Image (cartoon, grey):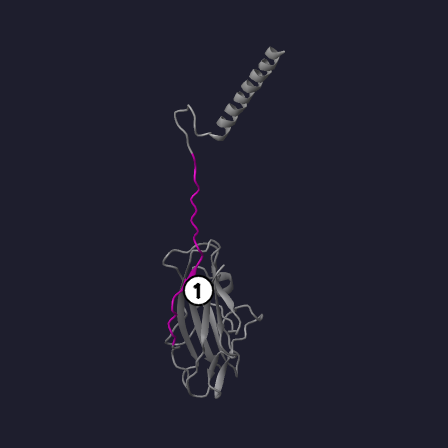
């Protein structure tokens, strides 16, 4: 009876020893007879999205409109840079309607494109005086704004061949866009301004339009 009891104790102790040994190897995986062990870490870097725009130069349209000259053109430009993976949009708007005004004395109506909202070949009807804009550059849609690479002749005020114009709005209108990251130097978009009086005189004075360009990371 005593021998049987001692035998049971021996067997139970032996089983406990095997269980403790198995647990030890389970919780201590780095203790091994292998020649090497390894572990991995994850390194994370967050790159934030941003966009910048250069200062556009003020524009004086030439030649001056008066008794002997009915047309004038002008230009400016902005350079946009972004690291946004989805790119950017560049939009413009005027601060007033109509955009080009001589205080409360007189104004040039915003160009009336046809159909409305779609840039078209510059044309001002008899008895009208109008002011509008076009654009060109690497990210400007030529199917919308035309195939020109300059704004026209500042000596005669004639707009560039192949250009298409529309009137300004007090709401943003996109003139350029890109679906990707730009070079560090950015990408330049050019804007053209045109004004014309046809068989009518604009009152003498200084006419101004304030145009705001907004670059947005897409």
Q: Is residue 14 magenta?
A: no
Camera-side residue: 110 or 178? 178
Give the residue pinned by disc 1: 136
Q: Position of residue 177 (x, y in %)?
A: 48, 60
- State which region is magenta: 39-59
Is residue 159 at all visible to an observer of this figure?
Answer: no
In the rendered image, which quarter is residue 57 located in?
bottom left
Quarter occupied by residue 76:
bottom left
Q: Residue at x 41, y 82 (%)?
A: 65
Q: Residue at x 58, y 19 (%)?
A: 12
Q: From what the image shows, is residue 215 above or below residue 206?
A: above
Main SS type for the magenta part?
loop
Q: Position of residue 45 (x, y in %)?
A: 42, 49
Pointer 1: residues within 10 angstroms few (<14), some, or many (20+)? many
Q: Nearer the viewer, residue 77 or 85?
A: 85
Label 1 element class: strand
Of 28 and 46, the residue lying toward us: 28
Extreme residue in the front direction: 2
Q: Residue at x 39, y 81 (%)?
A: 64
């Amino acid at each position: 009876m005593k021998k049987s009891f001692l035998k049971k104790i021996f067997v139970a102790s032996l089983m406990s020893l095997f269980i403790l040994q198995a647990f030890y190897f389970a919780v201590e995986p780095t203790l091994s007879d292998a020649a090497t062990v390894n572990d991995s870490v994850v390194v994370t870097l967050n790159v934030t999205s941003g966009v910048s725009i250069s200062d556009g130069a003020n524009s004086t349209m030439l030649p001056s409109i008066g008794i002997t000259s009915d047309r004038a053109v002008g230009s400016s430009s902005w350079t946009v840079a972004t690291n946004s993976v989805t790119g950017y949009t560049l939009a413009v708007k005027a601060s007033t309607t109509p955009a080009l005004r001589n205080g409360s004395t007189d104004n040039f109506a915003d160009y009336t494109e046809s159909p409305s909202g779609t840039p078209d070949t510059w044309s001002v009807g008899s008895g009208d005086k109008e002011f509008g804009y076009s654009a060109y550059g690497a990210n400007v849609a030529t199917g919308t704004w035309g195939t020109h690479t300059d704004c026209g002749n500042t000596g005669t005020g004639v707009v560039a061949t192949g250009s298409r114009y529309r009137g300004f709005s007090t709401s943003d209108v996109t003139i350029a866009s890109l679906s990707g990251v730009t070079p560090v130097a950015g990408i330049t978009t050019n804007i053209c301004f045109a004004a014309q009086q046809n068989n009518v005189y604009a009152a003498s004075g200084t006419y101004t339009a304030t145009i705001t360009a907004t670059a947005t990371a897409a």
